Amino acid sequence: MARRFREAWKPFLDSKGMEFFHATDDFRRPDAEEIFSSLAKLTKDTALRGCINFLSDKELTRLSKSGAQRYAGSGFSTSTLGCMKLMADMAREQNRRIVYFIEGGNRFAGELRHFLSQIKERPQQIDQYAMAGADTYDKKDVIQLQAADLFAWSFTRSHYRGSWAEAVFMLTKDRVLPHTMTSFDPVMLAMVNSFHGMRSNRKRFS
């Protein structure tokens, strides 16, 4: 299915003169509706499940004030690890392992890679994340990451606008693609990481 996604999406991008899909920029295009709906349909045709983990500003503030951020990291690292845990719970039920392809453009991608390295050094954590491998990649190189870009942007936009974005309806309304959405306690993640001797490589936290 990953191969099928590339075979369909790359020619579509070429036909639009696009190097890659980036929702933050592309929703302003005059042909945005066609682009977003095409990506949503292709995602539903090729994905097994959609997962999203969301942290509100309030939760991130609580994490920072508690001093736990040194163990959980930035909002990017915390929410990514939380989403990985959600995916791992499903993978273990099927006795499977996951190779995690994570978009690397975020300014805290280096911190996340530090957490991934620490997980790889700890067999118990490898099992907790059902990890066969993990690293960050450019969405231009791993084209399937563009499907995740659509869902993450759409969900975040929905949260701050107080109403569901159209792209979320396109991805979920007919229930062709099952989705799991969750929020979790980042302080608990920090406690687990602290227990396993894992922490951020950053020196300062704001």
Image (cartoon, grey):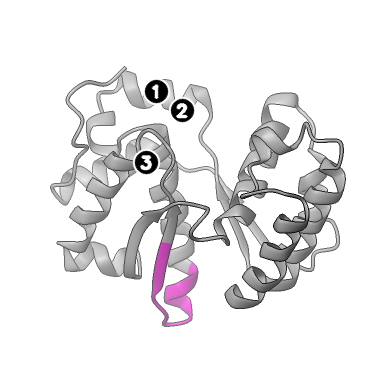
> Looking at the image, is 137 positioned above or below residue 153?
below
Circle 3 SS class: helix
Q: Which residue is mark 1?
A: 62
What x and y, as percent, mark residue 52?
Answer: 57, 50
> Looking at the image, is 161 positioned above or below residue 118?
above
**Camera-side residue of 45 and 169:** 45
What x and y, as percent, mark residue 60?
Answer: 43, 26
- Whether residue 48 is visible to the viewer of this picture, yes or no, is no
The kind of residue on which mark 2 rests is Glu
What is the C-alpha distance between the residues marked 1 and 2? 5 Å
> Looking at the image, is 203 positioned above or below residue 164?
above
**Camera-side residue of 67 and 149:** 149
State the extent of the magenta-drawn residues as a range: 90-100
Q: Residue at x 15, y 62 (%)?
A: 121
**Camera-side residue of 34 and 148:** 34
Q: Residue at x 41, y 33 (%)?
A: 75
CB-based contact (under 8 Å), mark 1 and mark 2: yes
Q: Which mark is residue 59?
A: 2
Mark 2: few/some/many CA within 10 Å (<14, 14-19, 20+): some
Q: Which residue is mark 3?
A: 77
CB-based contact (under 8 Å), mark 2 and mark 3: no
Q: Nearer the viewer, mark 2 or mark 3?
A: 3
Q: Is residue 10 left or right of residue 176?
A: left
The N terminus lies in quadrant: bottom right
> Looking at the image, is 163 positioned above or below residue 90?
above
The kind of residue on which mark 3 rests is Ser
CB-based contact (under 8 Å), mark 3 and mark 1: no
Residue at the limit of the structure toward the bottom, as seen here: 95
Query: Is tag 3's residue or tag 1's residue first in the polypeptide sequence?
Result: 1
Q: Residue at x 50, y 22 (%)?
A: 58
What x and y, as percent, mark residue 96?
Answer: 42, 80
